[in-house]
Amino acid sequence: MIAWERLTPAVERAAGIAASNFPAHHDVNDVKQSIWVWIMENKNTVTRVLTEQSYEGKLMSLLVKAANTHLKTEDAQTYGYDEKDRFYYSLDLIKSILEVIFSYEDWQSFALSLDAMPKGKTDPATGGNNLASYADVKSAVERLPEDQYNCVVWRYKYRYTYAQIGAAMGFTAERARQVLNASLAGIQGLLGEQPLSNLRRGHSGRVESRGTASAVARMEAQYEG
C-alpha cells in the first residue's frame, strides 16, 4: 500500500521545484495533479522506492522528472514548437553574452551560483532568466586553451584592439583576429546543441535553431531581446 503521508509533501516539493523553472502561467496545481497521475501509473515502482533506506533523494528525482516531462509537453504546446527541436548559440548571441559577463569586475565568480546576482550594477539583463546562459558561456570560456582564453579576456574585458592583443601575445593584428574568431568558434562548439525548450524564459540576442522553420520563427519572435 502506498504511504500517502510520505508522498504528499514530496509531491508538493517536486511540483514547486519543477514549476520554478517554467513561466508563471503554468499552474502548480496542474503540475501536482500530473505527478499524482504518474504515481498511480507507476505504483509498483513508487512502492518499491518507499521501502528503500534513505528513499527521499531517489523519490524526489523521480517526481521532479515526471513533473518536468509534463511541463515540457505543456510548454511546447503553449509556444508552438516541437520538443525535439534543438538550438545552438549563434556567434552573435555569444558575443552579446560576453559583453554582459565582462562588464562586471567580479565576472569570474558571479555565476557560480545561479541565484547570486552580479555585484555593483542592476540591469534587467542580469536577471535569473538569463543567468543560466551566462553561466554556460562563462564555463565554456574557462575551458578554452590558454591563448584563446587570454584573447577573449583582452578583447571583451579590457577592450584591446587586435593590434594590442597581437602585441601582448607576440602576434600580428591579423593573427590576433584569427585567434579571437577561433576562440568564439571554440565557445560555440563547447556549448553544443540544446533543447529549444531552454529558450522558454528568454535570451538577449538572436537565436538560431536547427528545428522546424515555424518553430524558429515563433521562438525568435517570442524571445528576441
Image: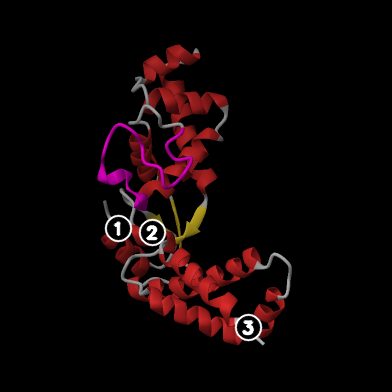
> The N terminus is located in which quarter?
bottom right
Tell which of 11 and 79 is nearer to you: 11
> Mark 2 Cα within 10 Å, few/some/many (few <14, many 20+)?
some
Say what amino acid the circle numbered 2 marks.
Leu
Whether residues under marks 2 and 1 lie with C-beta atoms below 8 angstroms apart, the answer is: yes
Provide the residue designation for mark 1.
223
Say what amino acid the circle numbered 3 marks.
Asn
Q: Residue at x 26, y 61 (%)?
A: 221
The main secondary structure of the magenta stretch is loop
Whole-percent x, y for residue 185 in the image: 48, 39
Q: Which residues are magenta?
A: 109-129
Question: Farthest front residue?
Answer: 5
Tell which of 75 and 5 is nearer to you: 5
Question: Upstream in the sequence, badge 1 or badge 3?
Answer: 3
Whether residues under marks 3 and 2 lie with C-beta atoms below 8 angstroms apart, the answer is: no
State the CA–CA distance, disc 3 to disc 2.
Answer: 31 Å
Q: Is residue 58 magenta?
A: no
Whether residues under marks 1 and 3 lie with C-beta atoms below 8 angstroms apart, the answer is: no
Provide the residue designation for mark 3.
42
Question: Upstream in the sequence, badge 3 or badge 2?
Answer: 3
Provide the residue designation for mark 2.
199
In this rendering, the label closer to the viewer, 1 or 3: 3
Question: Upstream in the sequence, badge 2 or badge 1?
Answer: 2
The total number of labels drawn is 3
Taking 35 as reference, is 100 above or below it?
above
> Mark 3 Cα within 10 Å, few/some/many (few <14, many 20+)?
few
| Element carrying mark 1 | helix
Whole-percent x, y for residue 118 in the image: 36, 37
Say what amino acid the circle numbered 1 marks.
Tyr
| Element carrying mark 2 | helix
State the CA–CA distance, disc 2 to disc 1.
Answer: 7 Å
Whole-percent x, y for residue 192 in the image: 52, 50
